[in-house]
Image (cartoon, rainbow, N blue to C red):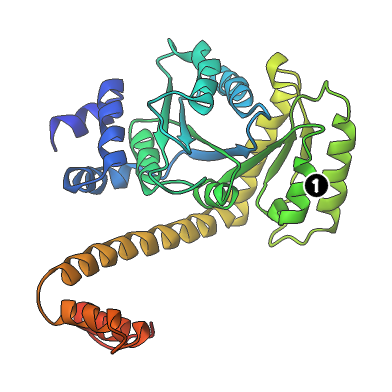
Amino acid sequence: MDTLTKDLLSGDRRALARAISLVENGGPQATQLVKQLYPQSGRAHLIGVTGSPGVGKSTLVDALITQMRKADLKVGVLAVDPSSPFTGGAILGDRIRMQAHTLDRSVFIRSMANRGHSGGIAMGTYDAVRMLEASGYDVVIIETVGVGQSELAIAQAADTTILVLMPGSGDDVQAIKSGIMEIGDIFVVNKGDLPGANKTATDITASLELASFSNDWRPPVITCVAETNEGVEKVWEAAKQHREFLKTSGELKQRRKSKVQAELAELVAGMARDNLKAALETPGENQKMLNQVVEHEVDPHSAAETLAKHLFGGSSNL
């Protein structure tokens, strides 16, 4: 076991920061680190927080951290930025609102790029969660902007998904129309002191009553004002209740199985892309096949089937 691994397991924050940078960038060293630390992962409560820009996600996360610290829990936050996590911008600027916890050694906040996963979650985020778990964090919050496929991606990554809305934004209508109602485990109407908050909560509740669910959990709709901490304790209580439901019902293991299945598919697909790229760039039969497709001598489907047999062996259903 190398020094980095030992330091991370002992809770060293610098080692944790370095480890997250490694897994975010990928490469052989990152892979080796994950292999070493994987047995120490899987223990934290993973909470996803998503919603459109401006609904107050970061303010809510900040308030939730306060609740968690009252319970003496170590809290990690991964703020997934759909642009660059290092060059500023409005999304990274939101992190400033979490600076109240900067000096707390039991809170670790990190912005991460999505590395081209539009609105979603990069593979490095899964491994960053594992680094936090191995370093002894009890709760890991993954925050991302609700654009594109992010709601689906965060639901896939988290144990508990909190969908944040606000009055008058039209997000409630959009949520109903886009079919993401089944993704949220907890619905939070933030900025509950604004006009229309009760109507937004009522509309969401009515839609949930018509929805079909795959298990016995019924998502609560909670109105809060994160900026003043009003109602935030109820959100945290709901998250704890959901965690307990997942554990007692067996749903937690099923969710994590689905997450691992999706991750394995992504990892294998990545390896396949790398192998295919190398094969097509190397002079030989594969490059000849590529040229035949370009010249319309062979169709892409037939070429793909042949390439798959060459690269992976056996038959292919491509």
Residue 311 in percent (x, y) is at 21, 77
Of residues 250 and 114, which is closer to you in this image?
A: 114
The residue at the point 19 percent across, 71 percent down is: 280
Residue 39 in percent (x, y) is at 30, 47
Q: Is residue 221 left or right of residue 158?
A: right
Of residues 228 and 92, which is closer to you in this image?
A: 92
Count the labels in the image: 1
Residue 168 in percent (x, y) is at 82, 33
Of residues 242 and 112, which is closer to you in this image?
A: 112
The residue at the point 70 percent across, 41 percent down is: 186
Tell me the amino acid under the disc marked 1.
Val
Q: Is residue 158 left or right of residue 128?
A: right
Residue 95 in sight here: yes
Q: Is residue 137 left or right of residue 216?
A: left
- Helix, strand or loop at label 1? It is helix
Decide: is 143 above or below 192: below
**For the residue carrying disc 1, how many other residues have a C-alpha within 10 Å: few (<14), some (14-19), or many (20+)?**
few
The residue at the point 32 percent across, 42 percent down is: 40
Q: Which image quadrant for residue 242?
A: top right
Q: Quadrant of the C terminus?
A: bottom left
Q: Residue furthest left?
A: 283
Please give the residue where the numbered disc 1 appears in the rendered image: 173
Residue 125 in percent (x, y) is at 40, 42
